[in-house]
Image: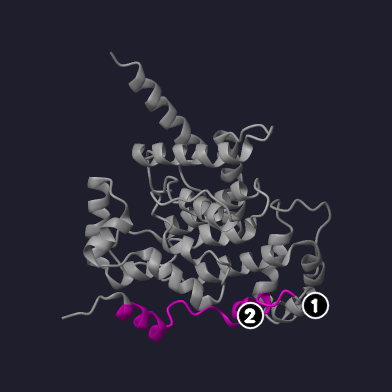
């Protein structure tokens, strides 16, 4: 009998090193643990990897930063972009480079995971930037990697996940709920394990593990609670594979974001409009996906929001 327990799965991932990052990325992760390290220290492993150096220069010259003059050296790039922004770029670029493709015949699409990850990470960063005491770059990483374990899990359990995805489409249940019912664990737990394995250690491991548990959102201080709430909120965004935004998830999203923004914007500031946030997230997502030569989702967040609004409007006018 096959052992599909959480402990057995973790040992399998460790043994097969399916998520082993390139050495240059691992070196940068290690350097990032020490806040005393600066551009001079980071330039060494980056310059030793021509491919990575080229990617970082492309990233620094993108409209994501909007610098007026072209950046031509790694030292110049590191002096202008924050260490955390550079570290995040290295993390997500390295991680998605080692993700396994699904087995032949699987309905699972690796491109969708990449599109969803960048969309959710971008959304997290944009929303987090409105609140003092929260580091948008740290929240970006947590939002980005919440579903990162799915490609490996689909490869390991292709038949099981085909059934789970079908069940999800038919019932509207969250994937984590179906995983727990079937396996006794869910992909968020594996994602949290990977965060620890990579040594990211940004205090949001718990948010990655519980990202789909939107019923347990704590908006009280400290700031880590709000950071976790933002990551969980991002899990309710429509997937790039969706043609419509699940009404229950859209309702939950709008209720939670209202609570978050009302809590923080009652002190004389204007409220944050979801449409503005979605427009910015769509633009940021397109920019970052362009860095890894991946197309944008067919339906934008703005499209999904408008479609949901029309559906609600139509239902309210029915006799």
Residue assigned mark 2: 30
Residue at screen point 81% across, 66% down = 79
Q: Is residue 76 visible?
A: yes
> For residue 261, what is the image quadrant?
top right
> For residue 157, what is the image quadrant?
bottom left
**Residue 69 locus on image (x, y percent):** 84, 55
> Under tag 2, what secondary structure?
helix
Between discs 2 and 1, the one toward the N terminus = 2
Q: Which mark is residue 224?
A: none
- Disc 1: CA contacts within 10 A as few (<14), some (14-19) or many (>=20): few
Q: Main secondary structure of the magenta part?
A: helix
Residue assigned mark 1: 40
Viewer-nearest residue: 247 or 269: 269
Colour mapping: one colour
The residue most toward the top is 319
Residue at screen point 56% across, 62% down = 141
Identify the magenta region.
7-35
């Amino acid at each position: 009998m096959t052992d599909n327990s959480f402990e057995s799965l973790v040992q399998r991932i460790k043994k097969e090193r399916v998520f082993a990052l390139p050495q240059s990325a691992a070196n940068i992760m290690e350097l990032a643990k020490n806040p005393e390290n600066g551009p001079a220290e980071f330039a060494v492993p980056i310059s030793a990897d021509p491919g990575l150096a080229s990617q970082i220069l492309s990233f620094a010259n993108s409209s994501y930063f909007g610098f007026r003059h072209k950046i031509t050296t790694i030292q110049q790039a590191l002096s202008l972009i924050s260490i955390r922004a550079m570290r995040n770029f290295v993390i997500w670029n390295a991680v998605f480079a080692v993700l396994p493709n699904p087995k032949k015949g699987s309905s699972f699409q690796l491109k969708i995971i990449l599109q969803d990850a960048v969309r959710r990470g971008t959304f997290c960063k944009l929303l987090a930037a409105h609140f003092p005491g929260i580091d948008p770059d740290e929240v970006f990483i947590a939002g980005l990697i919440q579903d990162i374990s799915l490609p490996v899990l689909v490869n390991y359990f292709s038949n099981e996940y085909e059934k789970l995805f079908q069940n999800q489409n038919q019932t509207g249940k969250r994937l984590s709920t179906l995983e727990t019912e079937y396996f006794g664990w869910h992909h968020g737990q594996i994602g949290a394990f990977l965060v620890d394995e990579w040594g990211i250690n940004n205090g949001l491991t718990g948010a990655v593990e519980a990202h789909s548990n939107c019923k347990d959102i704590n908006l009280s201080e400290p700031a880590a609670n709000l950071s976790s709430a933002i990551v969980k909120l991002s899990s309710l965004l429509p997937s790039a594979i969706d043609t419509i935004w699940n009404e229950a998830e859209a309702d939950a999203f709008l209720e939670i974001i209202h609570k978050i923004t009302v809590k923080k914007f009652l002190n004389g500031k204007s409220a944050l409009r979801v449409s503005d946030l979605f427009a910015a997230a769509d633009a940021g997502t397109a920019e970052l996906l362009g860095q890894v030569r991946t197309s944008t989702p067919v339906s934008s967040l703005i499209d999904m929001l408008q479609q949901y609004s029309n559906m609600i409007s139509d239902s309210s006018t029915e006799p």
